[in-house]
Image: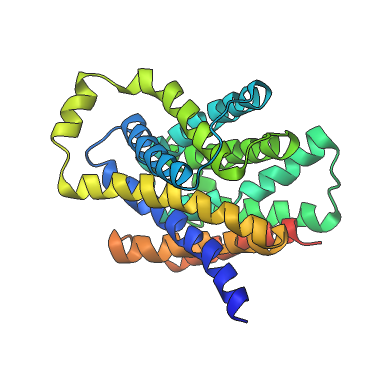
Amino acid sequence: MKTRLIRYWKPLLAMIFWGTSFIATKVALEELTPLMIIFFRLVFAITLLLIIAMYTKRDFSIRVKSHGWIILLAVIASFHLWIQVTGLQYTTATNTGWIIGTAPVFMAILGFIFFKERLTLLKISGIIIAFAGLLLLITNGEISKLNFLTNKGDFLILASAFTWSVYSMVNKKITINYPPLMTIFFLFIMMAVIIGPFTISNDYLLATLHLSFKGWGAVLFLGIFCSGISYVLWSQALSEMEATKTGAFLYFEPFVTVISAWVLLNENITSMIIVSGLVIMLGVYLVNSK
């Protein structure tokens, strides 16, 4: 029992950090641009992972074939984070938490289209239910008022759920000959190299100099806890537990976001938001059920 509890706290803590990452991002957006936030996040995460890798005496040798795949993943992940953080400028953390939870639905659709993975009637029903919940959430229950311009934040977050599913599917189908920690370390370095040229400028330096204590707290939390520590904990959980059991913890993330947004950002949580979110989670559950 004690060993099981020790295993469970790792994915649960990762979910808490990831669920509250949207709140920290909203705080950071008050002072920084989306690309600045992502670059800060990567720098702090790389620093932490470098310390861990050196302390545990990891092998830093580069394998060219694996690095080719890591570059591809880095391009996808960079675009994913950019549209997600940009979307958070125009929508709430609460909506973001629910919408991001639809990523497994997109994974099921992409698996069917590109990898001939089976789509059962139950999974198709789950996809329909999840998207019905999305429409309820985006339109606040008034589907006739669906407007792409008014809801551009929600649609950008939905696009980021799709890009995360693309990242997950590519990651699932390729072979990288690095341990999880070093894969993440090299991935973050590649992402920083991609994003850096679009970020480092006089504006970036001025924003850094004038960043408030609250802003520093937000980016430090995003880099150290939401990127570095969470990815390490998640990798360890995947190695210690069955993938299905570990994946089940992903259902907690939207609820962590909703509660955190209510407590920390004073976001209004209506009954329609709760109902829409539960409908989305039901659809996602059906997609993942066997």
Q: How is the image coloured?
A: rainbow
**Image check: 248 left or right of 198?**
right
Query: Is residue 121 visible from the viewing direction of this image?
Result: yes
- Numbered circles on residues, count: 0
Name the residue at 58% across, 37% down. 183
Quadrant housing residue 85 = top left
Eyeballing the image, is 249 above or below 164?
Answer: below
Q: Nearer the viewer, residue 181 or 278?
A: 181
**Image check: 19 left or right of 244?**
left
The residue sitting at the left extreme is: 210
Eyeballing the image, is 205 above or below 40?
Answer: above
Name the residue at 57% across, 65% down. 278
Query: Is residue 137 visible from the viewing direction of this image?
Result: no
Residue 231 percent coordinates (x, y): 51, 49
Q: Nearer the viewer, residue 185 or 41?
A: 185
Residue 279 percent coordinates (x, y): 61, 62
Q: Nearer the viewer, residue 233 or 105?
A: 233
Q: Nearer the viewer, residue 150 or 207?
A: 207
The residue sitting at the front extreme is: 57
Residue 82 percent coordinates (x, y): 44, 32
**Image check: 142 left or right of 267?**
right
Name the residue at 17% across, 39% down. 211
